[in-house]
Structures are given as structure tokens and as C-alpha cells.
Image (cartoon, rainbow, N blue to C red):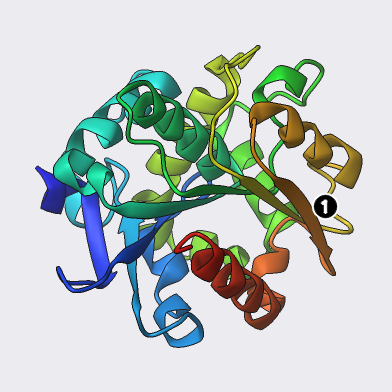
Amino acid sequence: MRERWIRRLRDDDGYGTKLVCFAHAGGWTTAFSTWPRGLPPDVGVLAVKYPGREDRLGDPFPSALETLADDIGEALGDLATRRLVFFGHSMGASVAHEVALRLHRQGNAPAALCVSGRRPPHALEGRRTYPGTDDEIVADVVRFDRSRAAVFADPGLRELVLPPIRADYQLLDAYSGGDRPPLDCPVYAYTGADDPEVTPEQMRGWAGLTRSAFRLRVLPGGHFYLRGEEAALLADLSDVLHVSER
């Protein structure tokens, strides 16, 4: 079950700390394929494989974001007893947080939660709703990520990538958030200075989701700042990963 849900970008039993990455809506594990080169060599790098994409094309999409978090928490299995640091971007931040809450209730909270480009659950009221038609979804994705225009221009690729994006948008629309109990682990927040989805002030709202330390870092760029600023982001995450070992 774990191999169905988790891609090991760099990992074996010798890694004491493991970074678990959660992609954005419609995202694949390939979003993190270059990360092992920019992170400390003694850290394992894992990425969550959402259903309905990559080698899970035949798997049904989850019915709710909370259900997705349930399944991921179960799939982690005994990995949850290891020193894990979660990183989630956009939708992935909400999924990572929900999984962290589930592990926290089991007494296996991650060593740290890193959230990126996403409002905290209690601040989702008034957020934009996601578009409904396929053409509207394509226009929305390209508005944030112009590099995807070429993908949608190819009919075969469009047919491949559009269904998981549509399904993830439906998860986001149905996820109402609300108050959540605080975690005991530190929370590190990241955002692009020009992200139209979330402001730095809204990202600071994640401070209320932990009894431990909180820190926000604002990097240049928009919603997908983490591509242009990958080196700076991974350098900061390297510090977080080493702090989590203490």
C-alpha cells in the first residue's frame, strides 16, 4: 500500500529524517523530482502519489480532501514513527496539514509542517470558487502557470492531465476548513510576494495552528514562486530539516 501512495525520490532505511512532499492541485510527484539534488544528502525525499495520475491512472479520485488525508495517513504506516517533515504547496498544504493532524492524534506528529501558498483552514471563508467547465479550468491553470499552455494545446496531453485537475478543484471547493486543534510541531510557512491566491498576512494565520514555533518566509514570485526560487526554498528547508533533527 505504501508503494502505491509514496514515491521514493531518494530513500532507504538509513535516512533518519525524511521530507514528505505534497503537490498542488493537479500536481504529480515530478514536481519534486529535482529536489534531492538541492537538499542535504542525509535526508530522504518522498512524494505523495495522488490517485488518478502517473502510475495510478486507474485509481478513483478521492471523494473529499479529508478522505484523501485519511488514506495517506494509513499508507504511511510505520513510516509515521520515523522523523518526518511535511512540505505541501497550495492544495498540498491543506492535505499535509490534515495528515499531520491525523498523525498527531495517533501520537506520531511530524517533526515539522511546512505549508506553502495556501490559507490556513480557519481563513478559507471568502476564498474564490474554482471554475466548472474544462475551458475555464484550463484558463485558470494557465493564468497561474503559463508553462502549462503547451500541455493543454496537445489534445492527448490535455485528456491526460485535465481529469485530475478537475477532481482536485472539486476537492478544494468542497473543503470548508474551519477551526483545527493546534499541532505540537513547529510550522514553517512560505509564499510568493505576488501570489494572488494568498497574502503574506493570511499565511501568518498558520501561526495559530501550532503550540510550537512559527516562521514565515516570503520569496519573490507568484503562486508558483517555488520554481524560480527553488534554490532559496531548498536552502531554507535544509535548515528546517536540520533543526528537526535536534
**Left or right of 160 on screen, residue 224:** right
Task: Find residue 219 and report its horizontal and vertical position in percent.
Answer: 81, 67
**Residue situated furthest left in the rendering:** 1
Residue 133, located in which quarter of the rendered image?
top right
Q: Nearer the viewer, residue 60 or 156?
A: 60
In percent of width and height, residue 72 lies at 28, 36
Q: Tell me the quarter of the image containing the N terminus.
A: top left
Q: Residue furthest front?
A: 246
Residue at the spot x=56%, y=27% of the render?
A: 172
Residue type (three-letter) at the residue carrying disc 1 = Asp
Res. 60 visible in picture:
no
- Which quadrant of the structure image shows residue 121? top right
- From what the image shows, is residue 136 above or below residue 89? above
Q: Residue at x 88, y 59 (%)?
A: 193
Residue sitting nearer the eye, 27 or 231: 231
Q: What residue is rendered at 66% in x and 71% in y?
A: 236
Residue 214, percent across and down? 72, 45
Q: How many marks?
A: 1
Which SS class for mark 1?
loop
The crowd level at tag 1 (other Cα within 10 Å; few <14, some 14-19, many 20+) is some
Residue behind mark 1 = 195
Whether residue 124 is visible to the viewer of this picture, yes or no, is yes
Q: Position of residue 67 (x, y in %)?
A: 33, 20
Q: Quadrant of residue 175?
A: top right
**In the depicted structure, whether residue 245 falls above or below residue 109:** below
Left or right: 126, with 129 as reference point: right
